[in-house]
Image: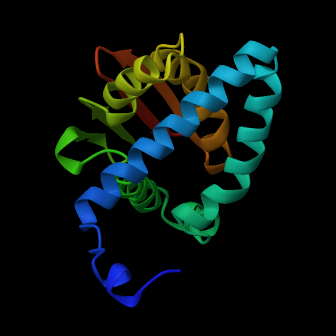
Amino acid sequence: MCRKWEILAIKEMPLKEKYDKLLDQYVQDGLMNFALHKELGTMDKRNDMMLKVWKKMLPSYMGIALKVMKTIAPGTTFKKLVNSFVSFSQVTTPLSNIELTWVSDREAVMRTKDCPLLVRGRELAKKAGLDLDPKEICRNDSKNMPKMLEQFGIEVTMELEENGCRATAKLK
C-alpha cells in the first residue's frame, strides 16, 4: 500500500535532467533500431520506411505552405526552410554546436560539431554492448536526406566529420 507521505517525498525531476534522459533514450532507441535491422539484413526496409514517414511528416515540421510559397518567393522560402531545419535540429543538438553559413539566398551550409547523436551514441553503444559506431547510422541516413528534401526542390549533400557533419543545401 502506498502512503501519501511516500508519494510527496518524490521530487519532480529538473527539466535539464529530463532532457538528458530523454535524449539518451532517443539515441539508444536509434542505436537498437539500426543494429537490429543491420543484424536481420532488413536495412533497405528500414530506409524505405524512414523515407516514407519523413516525406509525410516534413511538411508539418517545416510548414505546409512551403510548396506554394516556393513558387512565389523561392529565396525567402528556402531561408525559412533552412531556418526551420536548424531550429528543429535543436531537439538533439544545442544551437551552440550548429554553425549556419549562407552562401547565397539559394545555398546554405550547416555544420554540426560535437553532435550528441555521435558523442553520446558512442558511449551508449559501448555501455549497451552494441558493436556499432553511430557514424554508420549517419552514413546510412545521409543517403536518405537528399531523397527526403527533393520534394521541396532542395539538393543536399552531406559529409561526415570527426564528431559531426557538414550539410550543403541548394535550392534547385
Judging from the image, the colouring scheme is rainbow
Q: Is residue 59 above or below residue 141?
A: below
Residue farthest to the front, as pictured: 1
Instruction: Please provide percent x and percent y for residue 88.
Output: 41, 56
Residue farthest to the top, as pictured: 131
Q: Is residue 63 above or below residue 112?
A: below
Instruction: Please provide percent x and percent y for residue 164.
Output: 32, 25
Q: Quadrant of residue 104?
A: top left
Q: Nearer the viewer, residue 80 or 112?
A: 112
Q: Is residue 65 above or below residue 51?
A: below
Residue at 40%, 42% (x, y): give it: 24
Quadrant containing the C terminus in the rendered view: top right
Q: Nearer the viewer, residue 161 or 42?
A: 42
Q: Quadrant of residue 169?
A: top left
Instruction: Please provide percent x and percent y for residue 18.
Output: 33, 60
Instruction: Please provide percent x and percent y for residue 16.
Output: 24, 60
Residue 16 lies left or right of residue 84; in this view the side is left
Residue at 23%, 50% (x, y): give it: 95
Q: Quadrant of residue 67?
A: bottom right
Residue 51 lies left or right of residue 154; in this view the side is right
User: Number of callouts in the render?
Assistant: 0
Residue 89 visible in the shown view: no
Q: Is residue 41 above or below residue 165?
A: above
Residue 111 visible in the shown view: yes
Q: Nearer the viewer, residue 92 or 155?
A: 92
Residue farthest to the bottom, as pictured: 4
Residue at 39%, 89% (x, y): give it: 4
Residue at 31%, 32% (x, y): give it: 115
